[in-house]
Image: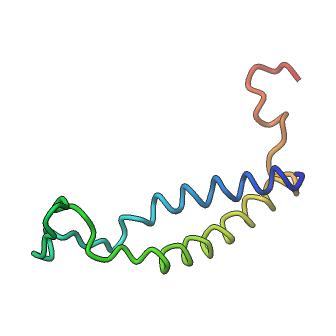
Amino acid sequence: MNVVSALVLFLVIWFVTLLVALPIGLTTQGEAGEIVPGTPASAPVDAMIRRKLFWVTVATLAIWAAVSAFLIWGGVSVEDIDVFNRM
C-alpha cells in the first residue's frame, strides 16, 4: 500500500468514525428545556466537538493500524475476492 492509499484509507475511516461519534452524548435544546429563539429544538446544547474530534482520531488510528496491517501482511489478496474465477 502506498502513501496515498494509506492516507485515503485513514480519511475514510476518520469520517465514518466521526459520523458514528457525533450523536453520542448529545443533549438537545428541547431536552434541556432552553430553546434559543430562531433555532430548532433539536439543536445541540453543547456538541463537545473538540473532545469528539480527539477521540475519533484516537479510535481511527487504532482501526487504521489494524486494517493496514491486515492488508499489508496478506490477510486479503485480489485472488481471495475474485468470485468469478477470472484470475
Identify whether 54 is placed above or below 15.
Answer: below
Would residue 49 be found to the left or right of residue 36 on screen? right
Image position, residue 49 (x, y; %): 45, 74
Would residue 43 be found to the left or right of residue 82 on screen? left
Residue toward you, 37 or 17:
37
The image quadrant where one finds the C terminus is top right
Extreme residue toward the front, this view? 38
Image position, residue 4 (x, y; %): 83, 51
Would residue 50 be found to the left or right of residue 29 on screen? right
- Residue drawn at x 87%, y 56% as measured from the top left: 3
Residue 6, quarter of picture: bottom right
Extreme residue toward the left, this view? 33
The colour scheme applied to this rendered structure is rainbow
Image position, residue 1 (x, y; %): 88, 51
The total number of labels drawn is 0
- Residue drawn at x 80%, y 37% as measured from the top left: 80
- Residue drawn at x 73%, y 51% as measured from the top left: 8
- Residue drawn at x 48%, y 74% as measured from the top left: 52
Image position, residue 61 (x, y; %): 68, 70
